[in-house]
Amino acid sequence: MKKLKKLINILKLMCLFIGLAVIVILTPIGAVMAYQFIQDPVNQFQIADVSIPAKANEPTMKEWVETEITKAGLDWSEADCIVENESGWNNWKYNINTNWTTDMGLWQINSCHKDTISVECRWDYKCSTRWAIQKRLRDRNWCAWSTATKCGLECN
C-alpha cells in the first residue's frame, strides 16, 4: 500500500512538471500568435482575396459603395482612392495607432469619432460608407482621411 501511494505521488509530481513545461513552452508561442492576430486579425485566417456576394443578384461590396458614392453626387475615383489607400478594400482591416486610437473597417474610421459612430458601424461597410459620405458632405472634402493627399486631393 505504501508503495502504491508513493507511486501515485511520483506520478502526480511528474504530471505537474510536464504541465509546467508545456505552459512554459507554449506561452511564448501563444503570445506571438496573439500579437500577430491583434496586428492583423483577418490575414491570420484569410481564405481568399475575392469579394463574393452573399446572393447571386447582390452587388459586391465595392459595387455597393460605388453606387452609394455616386448617388450622393460624390466623385467615385476620389472615394475609391481613399478606400484603396486606407484599407485596400479589406473590410476587416484594423490598426492600432501610436496614440493608441484605433482605425477600423473599410474606411479605417478612427476611434476618436466614437461619439458619432459605433464600433459595430465601423466594421459594417454599409453603415461606415453612409457615415463616410455624411462626413465628406459635412466637411466638403476628404481631408479627415490621412490618405487624401496620396490621392492628389488638396488639404490645408
Image (cartoon, rainbow, N blue to C red):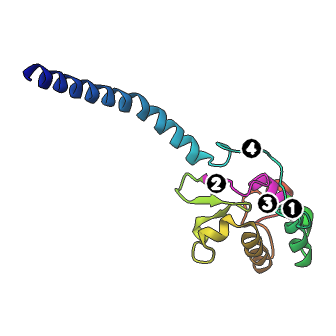
- Which-is-in-front pick, marks 4 and 2? 4
The dot on residue 148 is: 3
Q: Which element carries disc 2, helix, strand or loop? A: strand
The dot on residue 94 is: 2
- Which-is-in-front pick, marks 2 and 3? 2
Marks 2/1: CA distance?
Answer: 21 Å
Magenta part of the protein: which range?
Answer: 81-95
Residue 77 percent coordinates (x, y): 91, 62
Image height of 51 relative to 10, above or below: below
Q: Nearer the viewer, residue 110 or 26?
A: 26
Quadrant of the image containing the C terminus: bottom right
Left or right of 9 in this view: 90: right
Q: What residue type is labelled 2?
A: Tyr
Marks 1/3: CA distance?
Answer: 24 Å
Crowd class of label 2 (few under 14; some 14 to 19; many from 20; radius 10 Å): many
The dot on residue 60 is: 1
Question: Is residue 53 visible from the viewing direction of this image?
Answer: yes
**First reached walking from the N terminus: tag 4 or tag 1:** 4
Report if residue 82 lies within the magenta region: yes
Marks 4/1: CA distance?
Answer: 17 Å
Image height of 145 relative to 93, above or below: below
Q: Nearer the viewer, residue 47 or 11?
A: 11
Disc 4: which residue: 47
Q: Which amino acid does label 3 sit on?
A: Ala
